[in-house]
Amino acid sequence: MQDYFLLIIAAMFVNNIVLIQFLGNCPLVGVTSSMESAFGMGAAVVFVTTLAGTSCWIVQRFVLEPLALEYLQTLVFILIIASLVQFVEIVLQKVAPPLYRTLGIFLPLITTNCMVFGAAILSIKHDYTFLQTLVFCLAAAVGFGLVLVFMAGLRERMEVSGRVPAALQGVPITMITAGMMGLSFAGLLGMAK
Amino acid sequence: MAARIVQEFTKGLWKEIAPLRFALGICSALAVSTRVDNALGLGVAVVFVTCMSNVLISLVRDVIPDKVRIAVFISIIATAVVIVELLMQAYFYPLFLVLGIWIPLIVVNCIVLGRAEAFARKNPVGLSLADGLGMGLGFTLSLLVIASIREVLGSGTWLGIPVLPAGYPGFGFLLRPPGAFVIFGVLLAAMNIISRHLEKR
Amino acid sequence: MTLREMIRMIVVLTCVTGICAGSLAAVRLATREQIDYQQIKFIKEPALKKVLADYENDPVADRIQIETGKDARGRPVYTTLFPAKKGGRVVTVVLEASAPGYKGPIGVMVAIDPQNDRLQGIAVTTQSETPGLGTKIIDEPSFGAQFVGKSLGANFQLASAGGEIQAISGATVSSAGVSQAVIRAVGIYQGIKPELKF
C-alpha cells in the first residue's frame, strides 16, 4: 500500500511529468491562457492517458513481447493512442453530449500530446505491473492537470495585473513561471524518489 | 522554383524557427539540452525524421483520403522514427542510451506532424524536402543554442571541452529541469527584443 | 459516407500500415546483428578489458555462442565465449557465469588460457552486495588475484569448504558466490572444450 502511495507522490509531484520530465509542454503554453480550457484539457488527458497507458501495457505484454516484435512498439503505441482518441470522441459524443462539448475540442490535440505516449512508454520502461501502470498513468496525468490549472490561474492573474514587461509577455513568462513551479515541486524530493 | 526552394528552406531557420517562435517541440528541446553533444544527436535524428516524413507524405498526398490522413501521417512518421531508433542503436549505442525515450518521443514532436499537416500534404516533393530540412535544422539550431548556454554556464564546458577557467564552480541550477524552463523563457524574451529591434529599423 | 469511400479508406490504411511494418521488419533484420554486437560490446567490454591483457582482435566481434544445456521449459541455454587472439592464435577464452551472493546473483567473467588450461584472471561484472562489506570482492584486488595462474583442475571452493580460496573476512557469502561462479564457468568450459578448436 505504501509503495503505491509513494508511486503516486512521485508521479504526481516529485517527478512531475510536465515540470520535471518535460512531457506535454506544448499544452502548457497552448491552453493555459484561460482556466476553463486548462481544466478541460487536464480532464481529457487524465481520461485518455489512463486508458491508453493500460491498453498499451496489455498489448506490449500479450502481443509484442510474445511475438518478439518490441521494435514495433513506437508504431503500435501511437496507433493505439490515435484510435483510442477517436473512439473516446465518438463514444462521448453519443453518450455524454455535455461532457463532449467541454472536452471535445481538446481530444484531437491529445493524439500528439507527448504526455500520453510518454506515460505509456515510461510504464514499460520501468517494468511496472498492470496495477502499477494504472496508478502511475492516473497519477502522472493528474499531476499534468494540476500544473495546467495552476499555470492558468497564475497567467490569469498576470493578465489582470498588466505589469509583465512587453518582451516577456506570452510564452517567455509562462516558461519562467514553470521553472519556479518546478522548483517548488522539486522541494518534495525528500518524500519519494 | 529554385528561389522558392531556398525560401522554404531558410524560413525554418529564423523567421519560423519552430521552438523559439511558436514554442513547438519544446519538450525534447528542454529535456536533452543539458549537453551540446546530446542536443546534436537528437537534432540529427529529428532532421532525418522531418525530411523523410515530409518527402513520403508529399509523395502519397494525392491518394490519401482526407478522413484518415492523420492516421496515415502518424504511421509514416512512426516508421521514420523507428528506423532512426534502430540505426542509432546499431551505430551510436551510447548516444541511444543517453537519449532514451526521447528518440521514440520524436513521433509526438509537434513539429513533425505540424509540417506534414501544414506543408507536405499540399506541396510537391522538392519543396517538402526543403521545408523538412529547414524546420529540422531550425529545431537543431534552437537546441544547440539552449544546450550551449546550459552546458557552458552549467558545467563550464562546451562539447565536453572546458571553456571557462578551471575554478568555475558550475551553475548547477541550469542543468536541472527548472533551470531549463527559466533559461528558455529568458532566451525567448531576448529573441522578442532582437526581433522588435530589427523590425524598427 | 458512401460505401466506396469507406472501402477506399480501409484499403489505404491497411496498405500504409502494412508497408510501414514491412519496411521496419526489413530494417530490423538488416541492423539486428550490429545491434546485438553494440549491446554486448557496451555491456561486456569494460569487464573484458579487465581480464584481458594482450590481444589483437575484437573479442566481441569474434564471439562464439554454444548451446550448453536446456532450461526448465526445455529451451536451449547459450553461453557466449569471447576469444582473444594474438599472432593468429587464441591466447585467452573469456566466459561469464553467475552464482547467488548475499543479495542477488554475482556475475563473474573468467579468463582461461586454452593452451595450458590455466586461469588468467577474473572480474566481477554484476553484483548487488552490501557496500563496504560484500563489495570487497571487487575492491580488494588480492581476493581476485588468488585465482590467477591456477590450473583448471584446482579446487576453487573456499578454504572453509576444503578448497584453495581464502574468503574475505566479513564477506564470506559474497566470496563464496564468486568462487561458485568461477567453478560454474570452469565447468561449462570443460564441458564444451572438445567442441572448441583453438
Image: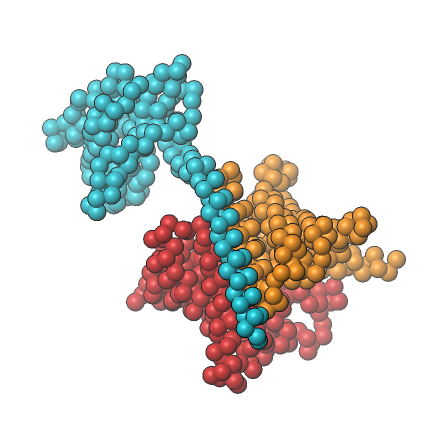
Residue C70 visible in image? yes
Residue depicted at x 48% and y 65%: A81
Task: Residue A122: give x, y in percent of width and height.
Answer: 44, 57
Picture quadrant of residue B201: bottom right
Residue ranking furthest to the top: C87
Tell me where residue B83 appears, x and y as whole percent.
Answer: 53, 47
Extreme-right residue of the structure:
B201
Q: Is residue A72 left or right of residue B45?
A: left
Q: Residue at x 64, y 73 (%)?
A: A33
Chain in cyan on the image: C
**Residue found at the very far front of the displayed protein:** C4
* B169 or A122: nearer the viewer: A122
Would residue C113 be found to the left or right of residue B181 on screen? Answer: left
Left or right: where B74 falls relative to A192 = right
Is B132 positioned to the left or the right of A118 in the image? right
Chain letter matching colour orange: B
Q: Is residue A176 above or below residue C106?
A: below
Front residue (pair C160, A75): A75
Task: Indicate the chain coloured red by its letter.
Answer: A
Total numbered badges shown on the rendered structure: 0
